[in-house]
Image (tube, coloured by chain):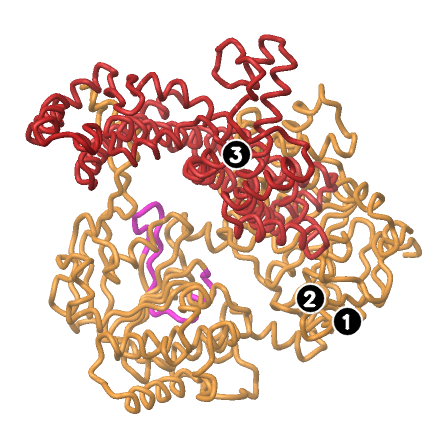
């Protein structure tokens, strides 16, 4: 163990110039990565984990600068290196993979050309051999039919495929260090597993070192040797992956671990031992909904079809040779299920399985192509989506959206956002009564009342999520559709929001339809679960049955793909 | 690609038909009586009626429209009463003058605006960025006739560097043999350097006037679009892979940033066609703009209809070109074609 580390960050401080003076995003941290080692940097948003990696490759944006400390890579100081030296290093010795792979690729350049650019820049290929080498790089990341993919544009590839291209790009020049910044965020669990396995396989094969930046402790535990935990720009704990999960030392690490949903725990277990601030009381054990009672909603043979895009239809019609009409694409293929009163039904599946389409039909934002949605005795599927807003049922079905920021009007204060549905459909009128109701709702969702005059950009992610929930429950709905309500939140915030949802359900007697791809969260919150794949239901039953003892192959596949912290 | 162009052409048919109807109606509701104007102030009512019936203006509107369209199908735009020539011939003679002026102005503007915008974005907050802002603001806030007169005053009257602003060539030079109708191109094709110089000297001031006017939108759009692209994830990837600055900015950022700029260019070209009218007046440029204005004053229907129709067809062609260009730059557009 006397060999010097490949990358040694000492006492690193990174500052950003802002209008309110310099802000330290990273405060004198020490991180070292040995040759062939895989290190995870874990932390919640704003912890400075990405900034650290950008400082290493020196691609901080113009406002940021290294204020103090040293970064040495194979004995070379990266802080004082010239831009020219850095450019040689980037891509050849140190490579990066980013989150959101589709955006990380040039949208209007063939992916093969993009790999060639890197090869040519670092003189790893000549113009004559570039194409061949690029195809070789694509083959290494196990892309099927690499010769064809060479000519593909990023928009023609799936998210997982794009991430493979990004990996091929990063590894094309055989670097010694790979920095992966949230490489699988936004990808489905099975794709995540495939991508992570690929990264680990390729880096092991070549004896490369890897830094994995992630917010997901499970991922860090499953794939890394060493874990560095960061909080607010500081490293709070560094330990081997096995140790840190068995015996976390720092309170923040413990808090993070606790907030990560795992098997065999209840919702309340997610919260820190001494809950601070508003509600967050543990939910009472839920009474099982009685099976004989008439369900709140019954969905029968629901179908949504989209016509396939026709090519040259206008011309063809004009020339009198209409093409054979192609069969429509079935996004949702005849599914049936029920939601009982007071029940939480989980709807899980990977992207493109039709779960969002289903939730949009039930919310009556789009019209189904067939089937019935019987809500409290009325077939609301028969009411056209355009007229549903005027229907009396609109009030009773509300929605909480995925992105708490994007789903709030940036020019509305929190109060105005919460009041919006009341002003449109509620019975309360008069400014004072409205204000009182908004304050009541804010208290109900644990949003400090003094914050309700703020605009969305003045609120934190968790506070915005609370505003979204307050808006959804403002009209005392019977059914709330939760579309991945915590996907954009940090785990500790997610823990609080999930508990809040559970508590509200008990108190207000609502039913939830919880749409998610996160099976651990579904396990905690839902009574029953439906698993969807390519528009059809592959399995349904109670949460324990489906997730504890899955019958369908697909469910098993989903469950094994989740990385688990060793606990 | 050809199929896309074909489809696009089809969709333009209704708009061309619309333009034909609207221009026809508009010219009829304009105040002023063509017959009275041409009969002269001393004409008797009898003479005016005679002229009116000779021109077919006493017919009901639908009949007039049918005869207009019938002639149009044969490529006949009617006869100008002011010049006494067929409108097609007049337009054919004057269109190249306008085209040469507009294109020269646009190319000049692009040559300055694109590099300026890119540099302003790359060195955000530097002196180049401020220069870019000043140039753009000044250019757009000066009306073209004012810039035109100012340039004439400085470069012709005070400095004496440029020739008198009297048309496309000075009186002593002879027109080059007509091939494209653009003097600069024709004189070069004929190998006639003297004429090229003379034409260039005449062209530079009016083209500059138009360029100053169109600088602002192109520069601002290039800058904004470059800034957005430079902040994009794929530029970060390109940087993190160690690509050279030239490659990152030239190949990765600039081509992506061009998409909105191309759209702006199309719009600017349309503005310029309109701004032409004033510039042509100031520089006594024998283009279609001044021709149309004169016809309008005289309530001379045929040239106005011909002018508007020509412009409409040019817009359509221009938009088609931009769509095709879009497809060349962006593969995602090609797919939808």
Is residue A533 rendered to the left or right of residue B172? left
Q: Which residue is mark 2?
A: A48
Asked whether the residues under marks 3 and 2 belong to the same chain, the reply is yes
Please tell me whether residue A540 is drawn above or below residue B286 in the rendered image: below
Say few, some or many: other residues with alpha carbon within 10 Å of mark 3 (under 14 / 14 to 19 / 20 or more): many
Say few, some or many: other residues with alpha carbon within 10 Å of mark 1 (under 14 / 14 to 19 / 20 or more): many
Magenta region: which residues?
A: A518-539
Q: Position of residue A506 (x, y in %)?
A: 33, 82
Output the chain of dot 3: A
Q: Are marks 3 and 2 in contact (CB under 8 Å)?
A: no
Secondary structure of residue under mark 2: loop
Letter of the chain shown red in the rendering: B
Q: What is the distance, in whole Å, between disc 3 and disc 2 at their CAs? A: 33 Å
Q: Which mark is residue A27?
A: 1
Q: Residue at x 27, y 23 (%)?
A: B80
Earlier residue among tags 1 and 2: 1
Q: Is residue A103 visible?
A: no
B201 within the magenta span: no
Secondary structure of residue under mark 1: strand
Q: What is the distance, in whole Å, between disc 3 and disc 1 at their CAs? A: 40 Å
């Amino acid at each position: 163990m006397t060999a010097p580390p490949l990358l040694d960050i000492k006492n690193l401080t990174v500052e950003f110039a802002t209008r309110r003076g310099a802000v330290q995003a990273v405060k004198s941290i020490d991180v070292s990565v040995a040759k062939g080692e895989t290190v995870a940097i874990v932390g919640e948003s704003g912890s400075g984990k990405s900034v650290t990696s950008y400082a290493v490759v020196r691609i901080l944006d113009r406002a940021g600068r290294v204020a103090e400390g040293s970064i040495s890579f194979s004995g070379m100081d990266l802080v004082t290196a010239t831009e020219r030296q850095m450019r040689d290093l980037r891509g050849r010795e140190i490579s990066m993979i980013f989150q959101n792979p589709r955006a990380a690729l040039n949208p209007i350049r063939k992916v093969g050309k993009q790999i060639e650019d890197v090869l040519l820049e670092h003189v790893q290929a000549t113009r004559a051999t570039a194409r061949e080498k690029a195809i070789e790089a694509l083959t290494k990341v196990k892309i099927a039919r690499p010769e064809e993919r060479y000519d593909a544009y990023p928009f023609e590839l799936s998210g997982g495929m794009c991430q493979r291209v990004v990996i091929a790009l990063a590894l094309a020049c055989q670097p010694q260090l790979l920095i992966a910044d949230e490489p699988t965020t936004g990808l489905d669990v099975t794709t995540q597993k495939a991508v992570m396995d690929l990264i680990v396989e390729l880096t092991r094969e070549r004896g490369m070192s890897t830094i994995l930046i992630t917010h997901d402790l499970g991922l860090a535990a499953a794939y890394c040797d060493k874990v560095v935990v960061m909080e607010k720009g500081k490293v709070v704990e560094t330990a081997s992956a096995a140790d840190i999960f068995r015996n976390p030392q720092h309170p923040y690490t413990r808090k993070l671990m606790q907030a990560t949903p795992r098997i065999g725990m209840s919702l309340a277990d997610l919260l820190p031992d001494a809950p601070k601030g508003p509600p967050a009381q543990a939910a009472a054990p839920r009474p099982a909904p009685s099976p004989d009672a008439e369900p709140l909603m019954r969905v029968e043979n629901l179908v949504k079809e989209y016509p396939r895009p026709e090519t040259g239809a206008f011309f063809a019609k004009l020339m009198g040779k209409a093409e054979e009409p192609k069969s429509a694409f079935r996004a949702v293929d005849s599914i049936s299920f029920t939601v009982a009163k007071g029940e939480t039904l989980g709807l899980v599946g990977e992207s493109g399985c039709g779960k969002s389409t289903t939730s949009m039909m039930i919310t009556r934002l789009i019209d189904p192509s067939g089937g019935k949605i019987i809500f409290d005795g009325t077939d609301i599927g028969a009411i056209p989506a355009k007229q549903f807003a005027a229907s009396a049922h609109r009030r009773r079905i509300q929605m909480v959206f995925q992105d708490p920021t994007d789903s709030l009007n940036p020019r509305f204060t929190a109060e105005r956002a919460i009041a919006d549905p009341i002003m449109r459909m509620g019975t309360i009128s008069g400014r004072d009564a409205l204000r009182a109701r908004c304050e009541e709702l804010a208290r109900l969702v644990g949003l400090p009342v003094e914050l309700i005059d703020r605009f969305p950009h003045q609120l934190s992610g968790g506070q915005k999520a609370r505003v979204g929930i307050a808006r959804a429950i403002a009209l005392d709905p019977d059914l709330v559709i939760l579309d991945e309500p915590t996907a954009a939140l940090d785990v500790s915030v997610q823990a609080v929001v999930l508990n809040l949802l559970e508590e509200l359900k008990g108190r207000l007697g609502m039913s939830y339809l919880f749409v998610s791809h996160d099976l651990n969260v579904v396990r905690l919150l839902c009574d029953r679960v439906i698993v969807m794949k390519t528009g059809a239901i592959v399995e349904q039953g109670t949460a324990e049955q489906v997730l504890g003892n899955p019958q369908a192959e697909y469910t098993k596949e989903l469950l094994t793909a989740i990385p688990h912290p060793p606990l | 690609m050809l199929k896309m162009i074909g489809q696009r052409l089809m969709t333009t048919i209704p708009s061309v038909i619309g333009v034909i109807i609207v221009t026809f109606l508009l010219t009829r509701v304009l105040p002023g009586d063509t017959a009275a104007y041409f009969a002269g102030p001393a004409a008797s009512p009898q003479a005016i009626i005679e002229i009116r019936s000779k021109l077919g203006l006493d017919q009901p509107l639908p009949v007039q429209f049918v005869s207009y369209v019938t002639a149009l199908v044969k490529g006949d735009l009617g006869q100008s009463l002011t010049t006494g020539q067929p409108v097609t011939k007049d337009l054919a003679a004057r269109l190249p003058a306008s085209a040469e002026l507009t294109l020269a102005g646009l190319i000049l503007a692009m040559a300055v605006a694109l590099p300026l915008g890119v540099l302003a974005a790359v060195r955000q907050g530097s002196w180049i960025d401020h220069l870019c802002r000043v140039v753009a603001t000044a250019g757009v806030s000066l009306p073209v006739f004012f810039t035109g007169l100012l340039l004439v005053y400085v470069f012709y009257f005070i400095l004496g560097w440029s020739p008198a602003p009297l048309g496309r060539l000075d009186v002593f030079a002879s027109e080059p043999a007509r091939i494209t109708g653009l003097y600069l191109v024709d004189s070069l094709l004929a190998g006639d350097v003297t004429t090229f110089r003379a034409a260039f000297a005449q062209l530079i001031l009016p083209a500059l006037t138009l360029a100053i006017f169109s600088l602002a939108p192109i520069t601002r759009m290039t800058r904004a679009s470059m800034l957005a692209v430079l902040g994009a994830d794929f530029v970060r990837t390109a940087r993190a892979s160690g690509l050279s600055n030239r490659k990152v900015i030239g190949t990765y950022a600039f081509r992506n940033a061009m998409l909105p700029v191309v759209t702006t260019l199309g719009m600017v070209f349309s503005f310029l066609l309109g701004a032409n009218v004033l510039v042509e007046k100031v520089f006594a440029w024998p283009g279609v703009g001044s021709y149309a204005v004169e016809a309008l004053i005289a309530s001379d229907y045929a040239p106005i209809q011909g002018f508007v129709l020509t412009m409409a067809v040019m817009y359509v062609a221009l938009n088609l070109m931009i769509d095709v260009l879009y497809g060349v730059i962006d593969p995602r557009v090609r797919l939808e074609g």
